[in-house]
Each structure stands twice: as C-alpha cells, then as structure tokens.
Image (tube, rainbow, N blue to C red):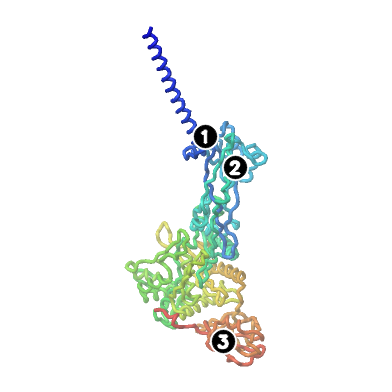
C-alpha cells in the first residue's frame, strides 16, 4: 500500500511540474505577442512602412512647366499650355477587351495596340499622350470620362504641360522643337534645354479605402520647380517681315532654299535668323525643313569675298589708287582660263575699288596671286573664316579654308573671287561688320545674357574700313547692287553669284548658283549688316535680280521698324534742289546732301563748332533755321563752312568736309 501511495504522489508532482512549464510557455508567448503588438502599433518600422506604401500608393514622374523663349523685347516665341493625356492601371481593369474597344473607337488607335498596353504588368501605362479636343469629346461620349470629369476605374486623365509656338513657322528653324516629354531635341530648345526644362517631380498616386487610385500629392505645389525663361537677341517684328519677304522671293525665283541674317555690327547681336524651307514645330517634318541654314549650311561665298580681298590688299600697303590690268576679260593660269562673269566685260586698268564695283574675277585673281597664299589665308582667318563663330547654336558649321601646302596657282587665283573655300551666311555677315563699325570683328550672339562680354577685335584700320565702304557704296550706286537702293538712304553692299558643286560630276554646275547679297545702311541709327541668300534660283540666277531686291525689302523693313532718319543724297549742281535725287559717283569722294530742309542753327543763329564729331551728331547739335547741308567724304567733320561763331541765315548752305578718323587705336600691327 505504501508503495502504491508513493507512486501516486510522484505522478501528481510530475503533472504539477508540467502545468507550471506550460504556464511559463503560455506566459512567454503572450508576453511576446503583447510586445510585438506594441512594436507594430506604436513604433515605426521602415520595412513595414515601405510595405504599406506599396499597398496604398505608387509613383509617377511628371515634368514641370518648361521655361518660355522670348525675343529681345519680351515677346513670347515659345510658351506652355496644358494637354490631357490618357493613362491606365492595368491591374484595376477587369474587362480589358471591352475597354480596349471603347478607347480605340474614341481616340482612333487600333484596338490591338490599346489592348497590348492594358495587358502589361505594372501599375501605370500611357495609352495616349496629348489628346486632341475631338478625342476628349469622344471619350466623354463613350463613357470613359464620366460627367463631372471622373473616369472609369483604373483609368486616369492626366494634365501635362505642352509646348506651343504662337508664331508658327516664322522662327521655327531657330527655336527647334521638343519631344512628347517636353525635352528639347533641336534648335534653341535643345541648346538651352538644361535651363528651360526645370526639375522633374515624383507625384504620388494614393489608393482609397476600396483600393481605388486617386491622383493627388499634397506637396505638389511646394515642390514645383519650373524651367527658366530665356531671351534671344531676335527682334520678332523684323524677323516676321524678313521671313515673309524670304518666302515670297523663294516662291518668285523657285529657289530650293534661302536665308536672311540681320546682324548688329557694333555688338554682334543677331536680330534676324530667317530660313526657308521651314516647318511647323507641332507636326512631324522632314529633316531638311528643320535646318537653320544661315548658321549650319555652307556655301562658296563667290564675289562677296572681293571686298575682303580689297581690305587685305590695303592692309598690306597697297594704294587705293594703284591700277591693276584687267587683261581684257581673260586670264590664263597654267592650263586654266579665268574669265569675267559676262563675255562682254573686257576690263583693262582698274583700281581695287573698281574691282569691287564691277566685280572683276580677273583682277581679283591677280590681286590674290600677288598677295600670296600665306597672306590670303592669314587675312581670311582674321576675318573669321575657317573657324566656328561660336554662337553656341547646335550644329554650327566652322567652314573650311584650304591648307597652304595644297594651294596651287589656280586655287590661289580662285580664292580671290570666293571659290575653293567654304563658309556660312553668318560668317559673311560677320566679316562685313568690320566695314560698317570701323574695322572690328564682332562675336555674333543669339542669347541675351548680361554676363556675356560682347568682344570686338580690330582686324583692319578705320581708314581701310572707310575706303572699302566707299567701294561698296559704289556697287549700289552704279554696279551690280543698284536694285538695293532705297530712296532717302545711302546703301552699300556686294553681290555674290557662285556656282554650286554638281554632286554627280564633282565639278561646278552650269545651271545651279548660290545668289547672295550682303549690305548695310550708311549713317543709320543702328549699324546693321543684312545678308540675303537664295540657293539655286530658276530663271535669272544673278544676285542682282534675286538676292538684291530681297535685301531691299528686308532693309526697308528695318528702316520702318527702327524709324531710321532719312539722308537723301542729291547731285551737286550750280543750284542744288531737293527734287533731283541721285548719288554722285565721283571716285575720289562721295558728296551727300540732305534734301530734307531741317531747322538748324546754334543758339541765337550762331554756327556751332562741329569739328571732330560725326555727321549725325552734327545735325543733332543744330536747331532753329532752315538750310541745306552738303557733306563731303566720310567719317568725322574735319572742316566746316561757315566757321564756328558765324551768324546763320535762313536757306544758307552749310558745307561739312569729313575724313576717316585715324588714331592709335585704329592702327593694325
């Protein structure tokens, strides 16, 4: 009995120990659950937070509003609007085939294409970017977009920025274009994309309690970082008029393409950069229509280079009165014969000015050969040829000059009249700025940037620039540029009619030419160089009949745009009148008379001292009485009649003799 009782006591003790152990285990489990519950509910866990975010939200990258592109006067050239785009969350759409058919009918995209996007993995898929008004209307009609603006479950209507160009194609070859994501892919849009694009934003899409997605980010406004506005040097009113004239002359001459450049010769600002063909930046177009031909397309400058050649000769101590024999229109160089443009031109003795005025190929060839390859190449390089202008515009062409070691006698002769070198319209306009501003080569710029220092490097003396300027005026007075003349203004410039290269034969074409004219308005309030160019005009291809009248239209637009003061030159006769308006062609000096009777005189009718100031400054100092002014020469006033202090009478003639201003600054090394 005792043994049996003892065994029972042991069993009870073991069971009690087991209960105690189970109690401890249950206590530990319950304690662990309580602690874990506290951690989950009261303490943030990054891993769980990320899991919750994945369950209740997702993200999409949206681009901010792009910066505007403005002209020099603040006129918008490229702006932003809004466009609606259609997107979906494939996982939230139950009947994909039915929705694909509905969307396909609404937006005019194939059902298969829409269905493919609806069946993609992931939480976001674009269906159609930048919907048209008609597509939006059909989406509403077919119930994809509900009354009030909400959409079917799983469908989003996203508002995006869209680029607009309010002036169409008139400046599109300069501005370029953006892609569907508002990223610049050509022109200024591409060049300045980093400034214009702003910073991307990550926008949250948050699920509601039923798992439906909303499109809301409370920090969106605070995080919005728009692009920067940029201002170009372009003067849009003048750009628009120049573009219209270019398009009209392209059509009239049936030319393949053309360009107009208007350059401020004092500070290098490009006021006009017009090209044709052009394109609508909101539509797909051919690559050749998008070319900024004035900056990235090259050509052989032809006879326009003769003005530069004249300057190089003068800078190498040639006299402007030196005579060169014209060989009666034909010059043999080795196995080659150089002839004038017209067979009837049998020039004999000519000055450098005559070479420019009459555009003699033979004399230009002889001048080039006499100067030599080294001086020619150094001089052309000094005028900016053969290297980039460095505007920063994408694809800018540097042009090309031959290497000295490869220049044969005939190639050297050809350089004299612009063959055997390659350049752009902007290069030529830049070179001619030196004849307008007193001998400086400017750095052309397209972007108005106060931090940019617009440099000017002296490349020829002021005296040389004035002598060449007089020769260029003669081109318009009685040479190939006569159709550039504008009543009331003195115009200078040079024509160029260069043969194009035949791609099939490799030689010069006998039927296609590049016609150009580069000129300026003398004594205008702004020193502008205007270049007009037409590629392969049909019919009459001479620049005098094509590029020159186009120049006149652009120059007249500039005169009207900037309200230039008229200076109408007339012939000097025994009794000068304002009715007989023509320009004296005296080789030694040009005599200018104002046909406009201007009220002038110093205080109390006393003649002021005008020595050392320009013709225009002289007129500004005079006020009060009516008189006629005769101006002889160019530059600043060297002498005056009557002298300072003389009493002036109504109708009295005043004679001002001008001469080029030559000082230490104007001398070249």
User: Which dot, 1 or 2, sits closer to the camera?
Assistant: 2
Dot 2 corresponds to which residue?
157
Dot 1 corresponds to which residue?
119
Examine the rendered structure and indicate whether residue 63 appears above or below residue 573: above
Circle 1 SS class = loop
Q: Nearer the viewer, residue 34 or 517?
A: 34
Q: Mark 1 to mark 2: distance in Å?
A: 19 Å
Q: Which percent across, then down, holds residue 639?
A: 54, 89
Q: Residue at x 50, y 59 (%)?
A: 292
Q: Earlier in the sequence, mark 1 or mark 3?
A: 1
Q: Quadrant of the N terminus?
A: top left
User: Which dot, 3 or 2, sits closer to the camera?
Assistant: 2
Q: Earlier in the sequence, mark 1 or mark 2?
A: 1
Residue 11 visible to the viewer: yes
Dot 3 corresponds to which residue?
610
Residue 537: assigned label: none
Q: Nearer the viewer, residue 227 or 411?
A: 227
Q: Which percent across, then down, holds residue 559?
A: 60, 71
Extreme-left residue of the structure: 405
Circle 2 SS class = strand
Circle 3 SS class = loop
Q: Quadrant of the C terminus?
A: bottom left
Q: Nearer the viewer, residue 557 or 103?
A: 103
Q: Which percent across, then down, holds residue 350?
A: 44, 80
Q: Mark 1 to mark 3: distance in Å?
A: 85 Å
Mark 1 residue crowding within 10 angstroms, few (<14) / some (14–19) / many (20+): some
Q: Which percent across, then down, holds residue 200?
A: 51, 50
Examine the rendered structure and indicate whether residue 328 appears above or below residue 130: below
User: Which dot, 1 or 3, sits closer to the camera?
Assistant: 1
Q: Earlier in the sequence, mark 3 or mark 2?
A: 2
Mark 2 residue crowding within 10 angstroms, few (<14) / some (14–19) / many (20+): many
């Amino acid at each position: 009995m005792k043994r049996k009782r003892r065994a029972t006591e042991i069993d009870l003790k073991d069971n009690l120990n087991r209960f105690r152990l189970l109690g401890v285990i249950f206590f530990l489990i319950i304690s662990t659950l309580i602690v874990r519950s506290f951690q989950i509910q009261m303490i943030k866990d990054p891993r769980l937070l990320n899991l919750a975010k994945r369950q209740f939200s997702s993200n999409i990258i949206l681009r901010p509003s792009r910066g505007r592109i403005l002209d020099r006067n603040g006129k918008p050239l490229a702006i932003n609007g809004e466009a609606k785009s259609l997107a979906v969350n494939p996982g939230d759409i139950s009947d994909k085939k039915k929705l694909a058919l509905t969307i396909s009918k609404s937006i005019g995209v194939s059902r298969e294409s829409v269905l493919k996007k609806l069946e993609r993995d992931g939480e976001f898929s674009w269906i159609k970017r930048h919907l048209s008004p008609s597509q939006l209307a059909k989406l509403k009609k077919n119930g994809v977009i509900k009354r009030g603006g909400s959409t079917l479950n799983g469908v989003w209507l996203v508002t995006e920025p869209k680029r607009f160009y309010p002036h169409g194609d008139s400046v599109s070859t300069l501005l370029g274009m953006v892609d569907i994501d508002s990223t610049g892919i050509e022109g200024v849009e591409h060049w300045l994309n980093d400034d214009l694009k702003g910073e991307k934003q990550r926008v949250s899409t948050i699920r509601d309690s039923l798992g439906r997605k909303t499109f809301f980010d409370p920090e969106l406004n605070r995080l919005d970082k728009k692009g920067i506005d940029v201002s170009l040097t372009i003067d849009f009113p003048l750009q628009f008029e120049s573009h219209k004239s270019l398009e009209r002359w392209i059509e009239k001459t049936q030319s393949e393409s053309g360009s107009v450049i208007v350059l401020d010769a004092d500070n290098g600002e490009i006021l006009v950069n017009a090209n044709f063909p052009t394109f609508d930046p909101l539509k797909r177009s051919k690559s050749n229509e998008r070319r900024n031909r004035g900056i990235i397309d090259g050509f052989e400058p032809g006879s326009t280079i003769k003005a530069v050649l004249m300057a190089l000769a003068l800078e190498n101590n040639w006299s402007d009165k030196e005579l060169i024999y014209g060989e009666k229109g034909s010059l043999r160089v080795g196995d080659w014969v150089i002839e004038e443009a017209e067979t009837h031109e049998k020039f004999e003795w000519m000055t450098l000015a005559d070479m420019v005025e009459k555009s003699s190929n033979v004399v230009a060839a002889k001048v080039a050969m006499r100067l030599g390859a080294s001086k020619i190449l150094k001089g052309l390089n000094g005028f900016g040829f053969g290297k980039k202008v460095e505007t920063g515009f994408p694809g800018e062409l540097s042009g090309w000059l031959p290497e000295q070691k490869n220049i044969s006698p005939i190639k050297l002769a050809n350089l004299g009249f612009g063959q055997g070198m390659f350049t752009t319209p902007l290069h030529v306009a830049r070179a001619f700025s030196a004849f307008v501003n007193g001998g400086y080569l400017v750095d052309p710029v397209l972007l108005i940037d106060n931090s940019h220092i617009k440099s000017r490097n002296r490349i020829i003396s002021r005296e040389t620039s004035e002598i060449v300027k007089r020769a260029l005026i003669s081109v318009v007075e009685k040479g190939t540029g006569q159709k550039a003349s504008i009543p009331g203004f003195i115009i200078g410039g040079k024509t160029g009619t260069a043969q194009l290269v035949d791609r099939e034969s490799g030689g010069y074409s006998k039927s296609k030419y590049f016609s150009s004219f580069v000129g300026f308005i003398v004594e205008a309030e702004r020193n502008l160089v205007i270049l007009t160019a037409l590629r392969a005009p049909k019919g009459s291809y001479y620049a005098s009949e094509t590029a020159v009248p186009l120049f006149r239209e652009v120059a007249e637009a500039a005169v009207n745009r900037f309200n230039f003061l008229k200076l109408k030159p007339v012939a000097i006769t025994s009794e000068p009148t304002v009715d007989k308006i023509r320009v004296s062609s005296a080789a030694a000096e040009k005599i200018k008379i104002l046909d406009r009777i201007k009220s002038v005189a110093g205080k109390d009718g006393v003649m002021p001292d005008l020595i050392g100031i320009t013709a225009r400054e002289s007129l500004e100092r005079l006020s009060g009485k009516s008189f006629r002014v005769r101006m002889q020469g160019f530059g600043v006033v060297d002498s005056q009649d009557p002298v300072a202090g003389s009493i002036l009478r109504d109708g009295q003639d005043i004679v001002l003799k001008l001469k080029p201003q030559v000082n230490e600054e104007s001398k070249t090394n």
